[in-house]
Image (tube, helix red, strand yellow):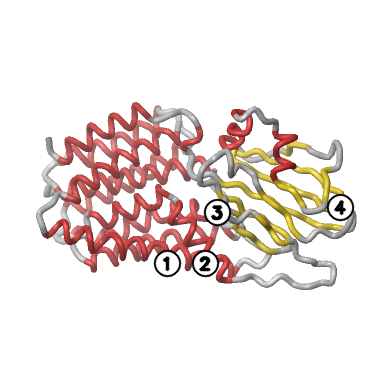
């Protein structure tokens, strides 16, 4: 069986196996805001609805578990203060107060770390943002009574950016799909530049609040972006002799737009189908198809930028943190390319079918993620 045949078999299996559980909707992440005042502190926590199911599965109730899991040193929850707030689709939000004998200096966040492997938490306290992980669960509470101004620490946001892209398996698979079919380092640079331009634009728009697309739709479209790039790889790897491959891809997207149950707006899917059809048309007649990779990477980079923004805890002063966070994403991206491209080029020189096999695996993962996240 050819790589394209393997890809079709993998896609069928992926679509059938795609779970309807919302846990397929991306990495596990939660957020908190701790506002210290003269009487204690007000705490607000936001978690993905699917992650909240892990609390119930452990036999715990949010009103007992959440306040204990986000604890302020030397403080106790105020009775009857815990409430669940209205939240965006796919999220749950909680708020409560704690009373303190003296001004607290530290908080400890144990939320979901013992229930979900790889969970990440972002805490906002005293005007500063903190990355909380399984191995680093404490948050320093800055004293703002004296009017001290919070200064954004660029290095912290660079680290957040690096951590986000390297912990986001779907983003990594998309980058792999761009790199695995590249014939030269120049082709890699062109595709990476397009991806950077695309995700930088939408990351800035989302981080500043100019645009706020539904998170579930973005997660699904990230899966679709992987599938489309993988199909193009397989088509190019086969010498562009199979017109049915791009045609079937466009038809599948259009069918979902018209008839499929999906979290993604139908108009958006229809637009993507038209753009993908145009892209395949340009590549079909191009003497050097790689030159169009930048446009394709930029198009889907727009989608991934909104995904990156979901992990950017925007502070009051956004410019420096945004630039630093995006720089961290770029560093992570370059690290992946630097690590993978030489190995792939080495395997390609020995006649190994890395483009076909790698793209087939990426296609199956993309279909799986799109099917499970869109439904």
Query: Disc 3 and disc 1: Cα gap in Å?
Result: 16 Å
- Expressed as whole percent of the image width and height from the top left, the position of residue 221 reads 42, 44
Query: Disc 4 and disc 3: Cα gap in Å?
Result: 31 Å
51 in relation to 342, above or below:
above
- Expressed as whole percent of the image width and height from the top left, the position of residue 3 reads 16, 41
In the rendered structure, which disc, 3 or 2, sits on the residue that comes first in sequence?
Answer: 2
Foreground: disc 4 or disc 3: 4
Q: Which mark is residue 199?
A: none
- Name the side, left or right, on which 262 lies relative to 207: left
Residue under the image location 52 percent in, 64 percent down: 159
In the rendered structure, which disc, 2 or 1, sits on the residue that comes first in sequence?
Answer: 2
The residue nearer to you, when weighing 350 against 201, is 350
Query: Disc 1 and disc 4: Cα gap in Å?
Result: 42 Å
Q: Which residue is mark 1?
A: 331
**Mark 4 in CB contact with mark 2 (< 8 angstroms):** no
Give the crowd class for mark 4: few <14, some 14-19, many >=20 residues within 10 Å. Answer: many
Q: Which residue is mark 2?
A: 158
Name the image quarter holding the N terminus: top left
Q: Which residue is mark 4?
A: 100
In the rendered structure, which disc, 3 or 1, sits on the residue that comes first in sequence?
Answer: 3
């Amino acid at each position: 069986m050819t790589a394209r045949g393997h890809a079709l078999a993998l896609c069928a299996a992926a679509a059938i196996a795609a779970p309807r559980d919302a846990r397929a909707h991306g990495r596990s992440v939660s957020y908190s805001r701790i506002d210290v005042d003269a009487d204690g502190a007000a705490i607000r926590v936001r978690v993905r609805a699917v992650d909240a199911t892990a609390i119930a599965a452990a036999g715990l109730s949010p009103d007992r578990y959440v306040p204990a899991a986000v604890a302020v040193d030397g403080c106790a929850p105020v009775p009857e203060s815990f409430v669940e707030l209205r939240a965006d689709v796919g999220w749950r939000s909680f708020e409560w107060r704690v009373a303190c004998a003296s001004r607290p200096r530290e908080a400890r966040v144990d939320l979901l770390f013992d229930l979900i492997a790889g969970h990440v938490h972002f805490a906002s306290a005293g005007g500063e943002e903190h990355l909380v992980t399984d191995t680093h669960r404490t948050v320093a509470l800055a004293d703002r009574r004296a009017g001290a101004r919070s200064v954004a620490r660029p290095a912290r946001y660079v680290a957040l950016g690096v951590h986000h892209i390297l912990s986001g398996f779907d983003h990594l698979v998309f980058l792999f799909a761009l790199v695995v079919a590249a014939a030269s380092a120049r082709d890699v640079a062109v595709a990476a530049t397009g991806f950077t331009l695309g995700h930088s634009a939408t990351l800035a728009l989302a981080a500043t609040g100019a645009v706020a697309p539904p998170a579930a739709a973005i997660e699904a479209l990230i899966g679709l972006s992987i599938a489309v790039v993988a199909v193009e790889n397989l088509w190019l790897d086969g010498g562009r002799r199979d017109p049915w491959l791009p045609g079937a891809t466009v038809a599948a997207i259009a069918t979902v737009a018209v008839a499929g149950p999906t979290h993604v707006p139908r108009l958006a899917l229809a637009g993507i189908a038209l753009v993908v059809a145009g892209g395949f048309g340009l590549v079909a007649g191009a003497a050097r198809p790689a030159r169009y990779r930048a446009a394709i990477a930029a198009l889907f980079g727009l989608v991934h930028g909104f995904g990156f923004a979901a992990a950017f805890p925007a502070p009051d002063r956004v410019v420096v943190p945004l630039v630093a966070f995006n720089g961290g994403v770029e560093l992570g991206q370059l690290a992946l390319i630097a690590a993978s491209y030489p190995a792939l080029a080495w395997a390609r020189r020995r006649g190994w079918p890395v483009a076909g096999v790698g793209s087939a695996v990426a296609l199956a993962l993309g279909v799986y993620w799109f099917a499970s996240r869109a439904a």
